[in-house]
Amino acid sequence: MAQMIAERLKFSNGGGDLLSFALGIYGDEAVRTSCLHLQDSVDADVNVILWGAWMSSVRHVHVDAALAASAAARVSACHRDIVRNLRAVRVLLKHQAHASMGEQAVRLRETIKTVEIESEIIELNALAEFSRDLAGVPGTVPRTAEDIGLSIWAAAVGGSAHRADGNDRRAVEAIALAGMTWSAKLATHNISGDV
């Protein structure tokens, strides 16, 4: 389902907007695995990670801990109250599908998955709206994979003191590489990072 939505929306608005970027790079298995690793490892919000990657690689705005914390605060209620709860039910149905429900459990899980994706799109749209308020934010312009990686790490951990281990660094590098690749494709097509 997520792959289908990603294909439908990829470059739908020129590719420079947050939703197209997020769905496009999340369609890459390495990015998806990396985002889920950071979600499990540091309790990161995948949408905030993707927003950080987009801000740094497409919009060329450095994301520090304060900016990441502000973005996370903008969507924290939606993420905490809706996205996480839908995910918890979906995962429960996946791993502990009740035998008495049979095929109904599978259909229910797919329905919940669709609603979960829709709630994450709402979260991404809220982050895009937050970004509209950041036009002309001063700061360093991310130019290298390391710069973009620092923005992604800030988005993943916000203001926490969590230190990256080797797996965390590899996850950030995979997301940064995908962001740089997306940005290069946009540049080839002369498309800007629109909100």
Image (tube, rainbow, N blue to C red):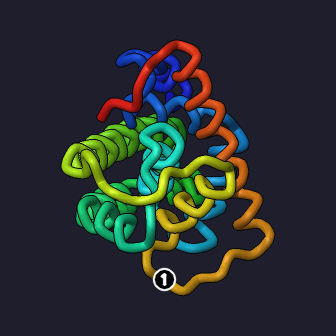
Q: Which residue is mark 1?
A: 160
Q: Residues within 10 Å of mark 1 (few under 14, many from 20)?
A: few
Q: Residue furthest bottom?
A: 161
- The quarter holding residue 181 reads top right
Query: Quick check: can you spot residue 69?
Result: yes
| Quarter of the C terminus within the rendering | top left
User: Residue 56 in the image: x percent, y percent?
Assistant: 49, 48
Vertical placement of residue 150 versus 31, above or below = below
Q: Decide if residue 36 is in sight here.
A: no
Q: Determine whether 154 is above or below 184 in the image.
A: below
Q: How many marks?
A: 1
Q: Residue furthest right?
A: 166
Task: Give the side of residue 87 with respect to residue 124, left or right.
Answer: right
- Picture coordinates of residue 2, whole percent (x, y): 50, 32
What residue is shown at x 59% (from left), y 22% (from top)?
185
Residue at horizontal 56 percent and vertical 31 percent from the top = 183
In percent of the image, x 52 and y 13: which residue is there? Answer: 189
- Going by the image, does 45 lie left or right of 36? left
Mark 1: secondary structure: loop
Residue occupying the point 27% across, 48% down: 136
Name the foreground residue: 141 vs 107.
Answer: 141
- Residue 157: where, in percent of width, then height? 50, 72
Residue 118, x across and y down, in percent: 33, 38
Q: Nearer the viewer, residue 131 or 162?
A: 131
Residue type highlighted by circle 1: Ser
